[in-house]
Image (cartoon, rainbow, N blue to C red):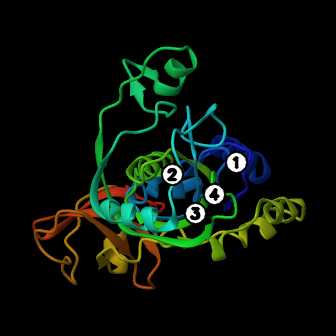
Amino acid sequence: MAKPPGPTSHDVVALVRRLSGTKRVGHGGTLDPFAGGVLPLFLGRATRVVEYHLADRKRYQATVCFGATSTTDDLEGELTPSDGPSPAQEAVLGALNGFRGRITQVPPAFSAIKVGGRRAYALARAGQAVELRSREVEIDRIEITEWDGSDAERPIAIIEVDCSAGTYIRALARDIGAAAGSGAYLGALTRTASGPFTLDGAVPVDDVRAAAGKGSGELGRLLRPVDAGLEGLPVATLATDEMAAFARGQHVTPAGGVPQPGLDGPVRVVGPAGQLLGIARVAGSRLAPDKVLMDVPASGG
């Protein structure tokens, strides 16, 4: 789905749950309320494959505002003007060189990370000092696509970032400002891709509302197959007479063999027609079911 700025990710999940009449709805990575863009949603049985998407790499378009710092590292916090002149574009371009590859960043104090059993943002809102551990993230690409220096004291850069899951773009904006000798905060954020899901293919909220008003069949046409985005996983194909055992959660030795013996990772299990049966792991020459996404076939007779 294409999340608009404003609602929380939980708000969007609750809306889709109500419109679809489906209790089981999950998402593949939280977006801050002020951010918009790709929010992968999973309905019904598809919620069981969310875990295989949580490590998907992300792509963002971010507006970085220089000349001030923010208590939340974004436009919603209290702003404090920076001392000294704001950086020129050349200084920011130079600073970006230090943010490619594996980097260390400290998450924003106003984040959902738990500290002593409480969310960091709750502690920060209560006026308590929050010290979060730094973490390693990976930046595959970071580039300036637009620069607005019309206000020399408050220049603005539009940057594109390809990064690992768990990267805080707010922290990235803050740290770029510091590296360029100024303050900076995140002024706007759009997630343009989450793994294989892109903004061009995301469904706007209004389209979901319109489809829901025409009935469940119309809403169903907006859904992708359960294994959409998992095409990169190794595939094991079961014969028809092997499917019942898999459906019961039993280990199966496929007649066609297992992909990559000794593989340590999930395998997409499909039937003779290519239909998704579930997710398994390789155990010697057998498949050990991890997620069974099919019903037990009815016995003949």
Residue on which the image places disc 1: 12
> Who comes first in sequence, dot 4 or dot 3?
4
| Circle 3 crowding by C-alpha within 10 Å: few under 14, some 14–19, many from 20 | many
Q: Which mark is residue 29?
A: 2
The residue positioned farthest toward the front in the image shown: 84
> Who comes first in sequence, dot 3 or dot 2?
2
Q: What kind of residue is marked 2? A: Gly
Q: Residue 70 appears in which quarter of the rendering?
A: top right
> Who comes first in sequence, dot 1 or dot 4?
1
Q: Which mark is residue 157?
A: 3
Between marks 3 and 2 in the image, the one whose residue lies nearer the viewer:
3
Q: Are marks 3 and 1 in contact (CB under 8 Å)?
A: no
Report the residue at 60% width, 45% height from top: 32
Between marks 1 and 4 in the image, the one whose residue lies nearer the viewer:
4
CA–CA distance in space, label 3 to label 1: 29 Å
Q: Which mark is residue 152?
A: 4
- Against 11, is 165 above or below? below
Q: Which mark is residue 113?
A: none
